[in-house]
Image (spheres, helix red, strand yellow):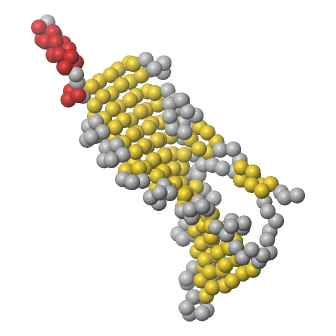
Amino acid sequence: MNALVLAKNLPVKSAGKAEKTKYIAPVEIEKQPEPETKKETIYRRNKSSVDRVIEYDAKTGNKLKVIHYDYFNNEKIRAIDEFVPETGKKYRTINYILYKSIDEFDTDTGKRIRTINYDIRNENRITSIQEYDTETDKIKKVTLYRRDGQTISTIKEINPKTENVIRWTSFRESRTISSISEYNAQNGRPSKTTYFYRDGQTVREVHNYNPANGEWKQFIRYDKHDKILETEVAPKYQSKQEKENIAQLIDSLYNKNLSFE
């Protein structure tokens, strides 16, 4: 009977007023018996230093692993490619250049779908995760972690076609959402920023901007029961009635000869 191994996934935080932190349940991966293997060593042009060692399934001929070695040091591993035994398609590359990182690939298209970066001083501590758009091969999302390597600090969502940030979510150390900023996908200008109370769900303030040029338009502050406490509109974007009301208020103040000390 084949043993089952639990592959533990990372916590995923959903950005939004009514959404809470979600965790991907551990996935059960069936561990197959180790296949019989054969190895092939590829040397560099100088015939003395090893470039890479390829490991094959002896029965199917499918690649299982390719170990790439450093050019100046035969004993130092530069990267390891890992393949699905049944198909021989690459699903992961572990890099050891400057710092450890792991590239994950779509086994159907061969395209990179995610890169996990680790701390240069601690290869078990995650610093960031980059996710890729398979159509353009460009980054569509970046998740930054705090020094503990587990708590999310920031999530940046990017339009892969324009490479502009379209959404920026900031988290508190308590793991609740602090704020969400939204941007125009075409020009990268801010359109809206929402600030939350410490529960990460109840809206505290909303700042609206003109997405065409990023100019501030309106400010709204709420209490913890969604009641508006304060609102303000930039003069340029006030309605005709609002401007008339302000003018009347000013006239009223002067007519009554009110003074402020």
Judge whether 119 appears above or below 178 on screen. Answer: below
Among all residues in the image, which is located at the extreme top? 256
Number of numbered discs: 0
Quadrant where the C terminus lies?
top left
- The residue under the point 46% across, 31% down is 196
Q: Nearer the viewer, residue 60 or 133?
A: 60
- Residue 118 visible in the displayed image: no
Among all residues in the image, which is located at the extreme right? 1
Judge whether 90 appears above or below 163 on screen. Answer: below
- Residue 48 visible in the displayed image: yes
- The residue under the point 56% across, 93% down is 46
- The residue under the point 64% across, 42% down is 23
Residue 188 position in % (x across, y down)? 33, 47
- The residue under the point 60% across, 48% down is 150
Where residue 34 sits, quadrant-wise, is: bottom right
Quadrant where the N terminus lies?
bottom right
Is residue 151 found left or right of 254 in the rendered image?
right
Q: Nearer the viewer, residue 216 or 164?
A: 164
Residue 27 position in % (x across, y down)? 71, 49
Residue 159 position in % (x across, y down)? 41, 50
Where residue 19 sits, quadrant-wise, is: top right
Judge whether 10 appears above or below 236 on screen. Answer: below
Judge whether 238 appears above or below 124 on screen. Answer: above
Residue 223 position in % (x across, y down)? 44, 20
